[in-house]
Amino acid sequence: DAGITQSPRHKVTETGTPVTLRCHQTENHRYMYWYRQDPGHGLRLIHYSYGVKDTDKGEVSDGYSVSRSKTEDFLLTLESATSSQTSVYFCAISESRGGAVDTQYFGPGTRLTVL
Amino acid sequence: AQSVTQLGSHVSVSEGALVLLRCNYSSSVPPYLFWYVQYPNQGLQLLLKYTSAATLVKGINGFEAEFKKSETSFHLTKPSAHMSDAAEYFCAVSGGSSNTGKLIFGQGTTLQVKP
């Protein structure tokens, strides 16, 4: 299994509070991604990173920000959590192979509930 | 733009029967295609991938998929279902030579295996 951990694994918070989720990898992969999983929607990309301090938006980035100050850590922040952000959040990593970005490997997920 | 459609949110088969999970994609560039499996309360695990080599791809646990460009399909099959195959399955596409590796996921198909 790829060395990816996510913390916390479960969190319950209240509307309006800030929340930060952490993804940590030990594979030294260049690319890191945050997805959210909701029933009927599969997984949707929130933000991704293609290097230290290099990030970009995905398809559902509103209300989320990210930071990557080290290769191994990718943080996802909900500045002011809303009930619509109740979801399961997955981190993934990948690396380039032959000039193209290869398979993504996923962490165990964080279940976030916003009351 | 890319998209993935998985036909059937729930598929039920008897143990020992053929498993067929359908995936159709659209992509403006030569795609990379993936099938992932998710067991309850776990992250996603790669089953197999197509990256422009052989069109018939074999994966783990006896699964295989065939890339059919003319039909824009990448259906997942297994000749004989086991109880342990019960899980949710996701088809995903990325833009092949893309330098970001961003994945677009289908909505997922839950496979039920009946004794």
Image: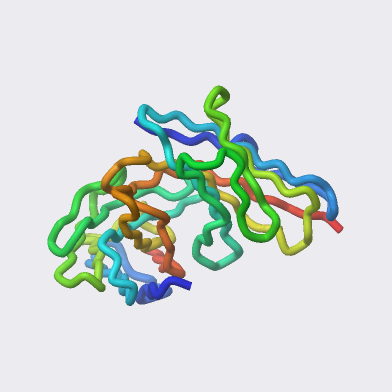
Residue A110: image quadrant is bottom left
Count of all numbered marks drawn on residues in the image: 0
Image vertical order of residue A11 relative to residue B103, above or below: below
Measured as percent of width and height from the top left, residue A55 is found at 18, 55
The reply, left or right, for residue B78 in relation to residue B98 is right
Measured as percent of width and height from the top left, residue B28 is found at 36, 27
Q: Which colour scheme is used?
A: rainbow
Residue B88: image quadrant is bottom right
Q: Residue at image x 60%, y 63%?
A: B39
Residue toward you, A5 or B50: B50
Q: Can residue A83 be seen in this view?
A: no
Measured as percent of width and height from the top left, residue A59 is found at 30, 42
Quarter that holds the C terminus of chain A? bottom left
Image vertical order of residue A106 relative to residue A5, above or below: above
- In the picture as drawn, the residue positioned furthest to the top comes out as B70
Q: Residue at image x 54%, y 49%?
A: B35
Residue toward you, B17 or A8: B17
Q: Residue at image x 20%, y 60%?
A: A66
Image vertical order of residue B44 relative to residue A20, above or below: above
The reply, left or right, for residue A37 in relation to residue A26 is right
The reply, left or right, for residue B59 in relation to residue A100 is right
Residue toward you, B9 or A19: B9
Measured as percent of width and height from the top left, residue A8 is found at 36, 76
Residue A48: image quadrant is bottom left
Q: Can residue A102 be seen in this view?
A: yes
Q: Residue at image x 24%, y 61%?
A: A78
Residue toward you, A65 or A106: A106
The reply, left or right, for residue B10 in relation to residue A35 is right
